[in-house]
Structures are given as structure tokens and as C-alpha cells.
Image: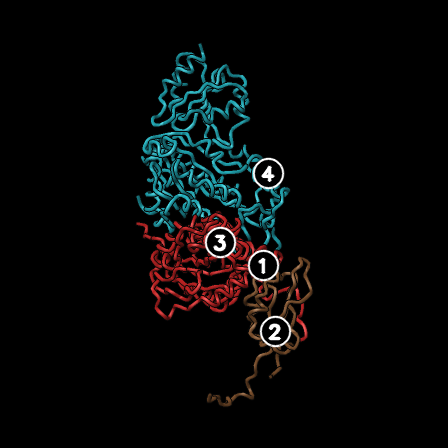
Chain colours: A cyan, B red, C brown
Amino acid sequence: MTGSTVLSGKHFIHGDEACAEGAIAAGCRFFAGYPITPSTEIAEHLARRLPQVGGVFLQMEDELGSMAAILGASAAGARSMTATSGPGLSLMMENVGLGIMLEIPCVVVDVQRAAPSTGLPTMPGQADVMQARWGSHGDYEIVAYAPWSPQEMFDLTVRSFNVADHYRIPVLLMSDEVVGHMVERVVIPPADQIEIWGRKRPKATPNGRFDPFLAEDADLIPPMVHAGEGYRIHYTGLTHDERGYPDMSAETHHRLVTRLVEKIRRNADQIILTEGYYLDDARILVISYGCTARSARRAVREARSRGIPAGMLRMISLWPFAEEQVKALARDMDAVIVAEMNLGQISREVERQARRSVTGVFHAGGEMIPPEPILNAIREAAA
Amino acid sequence: MTAPIVVDNHPLDRIIRSDRMPHIWCPGCGIGIAMRCYGQAILEFELPEEKHVVISGIGCSGRVAGYMHLDSYHTTHGRAVPFAVGLKLANPELMVTVFSGDGDLAAIGGNHLIHAARRNVDIKVICINNFNYGMTGGQVGPTTPKGAYGTTAPYGNPELPFNLPYLMAASGANYISRWTTLHVRQLKEDILYTFSKPGFTFIEVLAPCPVGFGKSNNIEDGLEEMRLYRERCLLADKVGVHPERLEIDLRENQPIYIGRFFDRNRPPYKPTRVEAK
Amino acid sequence: MRVFARTPLDIARIATPRGQVYILPERCKECQMCVVFCPRQVLVISHLKNSKGYHYPEIAPGKETACVHCEFCGLVCPEFAIYTLALDGEAR
């Protein structure tokens, strides 16, 4: 591949490479990461591409340093990213919390593998999805997307940067080893057709009075200031007031944490993405995401060809959870099936939101769930 | 002059957040002294104040970021250095200083410290060494001398401490020195010098911690610890002391070597650039 | 002991600096570093207290003209609570 910035055209590449190209196309010019299967190819590809486009590639000493470095780079104004798998995401969790508290945008790609612990490094899993939601300490909301193809690895990486910048939050791209390593057609649009959202910028000049963490707009997003622009802002992980100064009061803490949470909750419908298949007259709902959704779709099609009114809701965003949609759909269904490559994580959220029990098609990981068990579950539900 | 003139602002108020004074550090704590030297160096250096960034970690020394009137980042424990590396490389025009403590930089942050020194990234590290974890009440840390007391070493520290200048020298830092908060003129000159010195620079500043360290170790107050520095410190820079001997031992009759130890010219880290084909 | 000192040629022109001490009492925490490290012992801790109860420094009796504006008190104060300025035009 040549050294152009956006490699517009048709490609036959694997998911990790598509993700890296998505980052470049989105304007990412800083990557700090640590090699970990099955995400290493993202780092390797960016090690080659970032120097070509004037960006910085850093292989850090560990994932803790990687997460800190991408926050620092973003604080200076760069679109920054890291890529890892489960063990690395665990290490990054404290600083995901820092990114949320300081409201510094960045993208963290987790190409999930079978877990827990070292697990099966070269084989898929989807068991980090609850960790993506709750892995850091404290109350917070997170944004997470789950691509199911190399094309989506490209598209959702671009979207992740946009959402991160707009909402001033780390965004997790929860891929898996199957999607990361599969080779498929990826169409990269011309550069001028790639949508880039910027960060909200302050109206006040550096000498004017400016409260950097005062969110005056209804979307609760304060304007972002970068290091060196002259505003002299203090960013601290301590609970802080609108000036950014540490403030040890329960009232300030409640106000701050509520705003950080509401910043995402209030705008959830702009962030949530789902895709429906055969939902119009469905009586049996299958919910799935990532590589498992590919099998689920096949199972639903099979079921339909046998006359079973099955439909599928694919979660493209995992968090914030598509509560309204799931509640509305699940209410009228005869059965709800959740297929995921873990022992029941998103299924709990579905149960909680839909207030009904859910049938799980689970596997702890290591191998893609084939269509058969999902089809069997549909058939049992239809019987 | 019959009496001091009472005023409500200080010449350095433009570089500190004077609306937050008095700061939280204990009476006799040396961190304020080091911060003052840093502030003065900023004002004396030719770079506009807006181009300075200070990044700190967790601990008493980490609170410096909150008191400097600069773009400042009070990050997580041990991660000030990699945050600074990312920030500097994303905008190399900024002067990036990491101001943190011995525990934050050399214990939890140790890995990042040695790697940033190895890479020789152009960041300025000021390490306040008060021989303990002060903020949490005086536990021993990686620089607590053997035999000294701490709340987690009630029978005396059984461990040997880091020799930070030796560690930094082996890791590859371009500039390494050690001063105390008594040697204020030299400290300010040194900080000013490191602003012009490319590459990773490391200044260890010994500072009194009367409530954390002093309380467990029979050092009555900050003043007493400063007197201790005055008695025990020996300038080592011109004398050619081997870095191995730069360990700190606070027992009687053991010298504490201070001074400029290393001033090298290893190439600073430069991100790779290739021509697009 | 033989004294080797000679009268400097510019003694009429060069004067020992004289200084005026300025304090911000509310910031003082009575660490006493300024008092102890002043090379001329110009300062003593006064009986006056700030609102936190710390006694801040004052000029010692008889030391009203002793300050030489070496600035060490200001350099060593951890609290940004004291500094000196030169008293211009006063030669010893």
C-alpha cells in the first residue's frame, strides 16, 4: 500500500488492518500500544502507516503506559488510539476512568479473545463486554461498539473517533478474534466522503473568564481545551468543580458524576446503533452481536425458510444499551434468545430491560458459535 | 525597615494559582520550595508561560499541578510519565515537565520512568524525594533508607532503597542531578538549565516531610530536616563520585552527595518519519 | 594572623544592598525556615498570629537595617509568603 492518507478503493484485507486504516482515515495521528494477540496486527499496520502520514507510533512498555500516553496525546489535541485484547483492557481500566473523569477523547480497540486470564490467545471470545461497561471503578457511562466484519472494523473505527471527540469520552471498539483476523472486502470511501466530527471548542478567548468544566449546553458537553492553547486549565482526576479545581464536597461530586453520566444517557439515541433483520412480523427474537451475529443471522434465515417467524436484532453499539428498542421489541415476542460467546453477559441486560426471561445460546469462547445451536433454540421456542 | 510590609500578593503569584493559596502542604514541607524554584525558572526562561505544561501523579508532590497557573494535568498514580510522553510527542513545541514524588515515579511508575529515560523522550522530570509516601500517612517507599521507620515498617525498613541517579543513569537519561530544598539557588538554576537541555532530564530533590517521614524518624520538624541536609550534604559533581555511591543513608556521618551527576548528549527520541511513495 | 585585605578601589561606588521584607501573613505556617536561614538573623517569630493560628515573622529588635536583600528568605519559603525588594539609593 502506498503512503496516501486515505486509501480509498476496494480492498481485500483483514479486520485488524481495516481498523488501522479506519483510524488513519479518521485522522488518528497517535497510537501507543503493546503487542497482544489478536490485536497486534493493528499496531504493526500503524507502525508502518503512521510515519507515512506524519503521525506518531509508540510501542509502550505496557498497556498501562499505552492508555496514559493516548490520553496525554489527546490532551494535546491529537486523535489517539490504542489496541489490545482482554488482558490488556484489564490493565487499562484505571485510566479509562481517568479519560472519563478528565473528559479526554480516545479510542480503545479490544479484539477479544477467549478469557479469563491468558485464556486462548489466538481464539475468539466475547466475554469482555460487561467489563467494557463496568471495568473501571465508580459510576460512569461508556460507549462501546461491536463490529461484525472487516468493513465494520473500518466504519466503526471512524465512528468511534467521531463519538469520542464529540462526547469527550473514551470509546471502546469491542471486536473479536474472528472479525479481527477474517479477510473480507472492505470499501474505503473517498476522503471527502468520510464524515469527521470535531471537538466542541470554547467561545471564550484565552484571556477571558472561562470555566472549562461548565457545560452550558443541553448536551452537557463542555468545550475542550488543549495543552498549549493559552487557557491554562487544570485537569485533575480528583472530583473537581467547574473551574477544574479539586473540590472535596459531596455536593460537587454528585453534580459532577451526574453530569458525566447524563452526558451520555441524554444523548444515547445519537450514539446507539442497531440493525434489524426480519423483525416486522417476528414472534421469536434473537439478539446477537459481533461474529456470533453472523451465525445468528444464518440461523434466523434458516428458521424463516422453515416457516418459523424469527427475527434478529443485531447490537452494533453495546453501550449505551439500546434499552428502548429492546423493551419495545421484546414485549410482544413469544421468546427472546440471546446468542453470545460468553456465559451470559448482554443477556442479563436484555433480561433486566425487557423484564422477562431470556434463553441463552452461550459458549465460553474459543470457537465461533455455529448457526446450529441458535437454530435449535429457535425451533424449541417455536415448538 | 521597622517592620515587614504586609501585602497580599507575591511576585510569583502570576505563575501559581494564588486563588488557591495557602496550599495544603504541611508546615515545614519542602514541596512548596521546589515548586517555587520551578515557577521562578519558568518566569526566567524565554518560552512563553502558555507553552509550559506540568503533569503530576498522585501524592503530595502530585498536588503541584493543581497549584501551578499553567496547563496542568493531575493524572493517575504512576502514570504521569507516560501521559507526558504522549502529550509531548503529540505537540513537541510544548515544554513538558513531570513533577511528582518518589513513590509515584519510582514504585508504581518505575517501569514508565525507566522506559522514558531509555527512549530519552524530551521531558523534564522533577522527582521530590521525601523518603516516604506522605499523602497516605508516612508509609515506606522505594527510596526509604534501610533502617528508617515508617507506618508500614514499624521495626525499621528491611529493604534497601533505590539509588535514583544510578537508576536513571543506567536507563539512559541525558541529565541527572540531585539537590535538596535547602539548595534553592542551585535547584532553580538546574531546572532552568534542563529547559534548554534536550532529552530526558531528571532532577531529584530531597525535601523534608515532617509529618510523614520526620514523625517516625525523630526528625522534629521540617527545619530540623533542612539542618540535616546542611550538615550531611556534599557536592559531588566535580569530585567524581561513582554513581554507585550516590545511595542515601540518613545515619550519622554518612554523606549525602548532591550536585550535577550526568550531563550527556544521547540523541532525544524522534518519531519515525518516512516519505510517502 | 596577617590580614591581607586591601581597600577595594571601588568601595565608594559599590554599596552593600539593603532590603525591605514583605510578608503575606495569611499564608505563613510558622515553619521558621526564613528566621533560621537568614544570614543576618533579621527575622524573629512574632507574637502575632494569622487566622490559622500560625505566628508569622517580624523584624528582630536592632536589625532594622540589617537586611541585605540576599533574598534567601523568599527563596526558601515553601508558602510564597515572604520576599524582599531592594531599598534603592541607600548605601552603607
**Position in image of residue B175 (x %, y %):** 39, 62
Image mark 2: chain: C
Q: CA distance from mark 3 to mark 4?
A: 27 Å
Residue A191 drawn at (x, y percent):
41, 43
Q: Chain of mark 3?
A: B
Amino acid type, label 1: Pro
Task: Identify residue for label 4.
Answer: A258
Asked whether, in this view, residue C24 is left or right of residue B112, the answer is right
Name the front one of labels 1 and 4: 1
Residue shown at 32% from the left, 43% from the top:
A44
Determine the CA span between mark 4 and mark 2: 54 Å
Tell me if mark 3 has few (under 14), some (14-19) or many (20+) residues whose alpha carbon lies within 10 angstroms of its own: many
* Residue pictured at 41% horizontal, 18% vertical: A300
Identified by mark 2, the residue type is Val
Q: In which image quadrant can residue B146 be found? A: bottom left
Q: Chain of mark 1?
A: B
What's the distance in space between the residues labelled 1 and 4, CA to CA?
37 Å
Residue matched to label 3: B55
Going by the numbered disc 4, the residue's amino acid type is Thr
Contact flag, marks 2 and 3 (Cβ < 8 Å):
no
Screen quadrant of the C terminus of chain A: top left
Kindly indicate whether the residues beneath marks 1 and 4 are on one polypeptide chain.
no
In the picture shown, does residue C17 fall above or below A380?
below
- The residue closer to the viewer here, A132 or A198, is A132
Left or right: A349 in relation to C92: left
Q: Is residue B114 above or below residue B4?
A: above
Residue to which mark 2 is pinned: C42
What label does residue B27 carry, if any?
1
Task: Say whether residue A372 is visible.
Answer: yes
| Pointer 2 and pointer 3 on the same chain | no
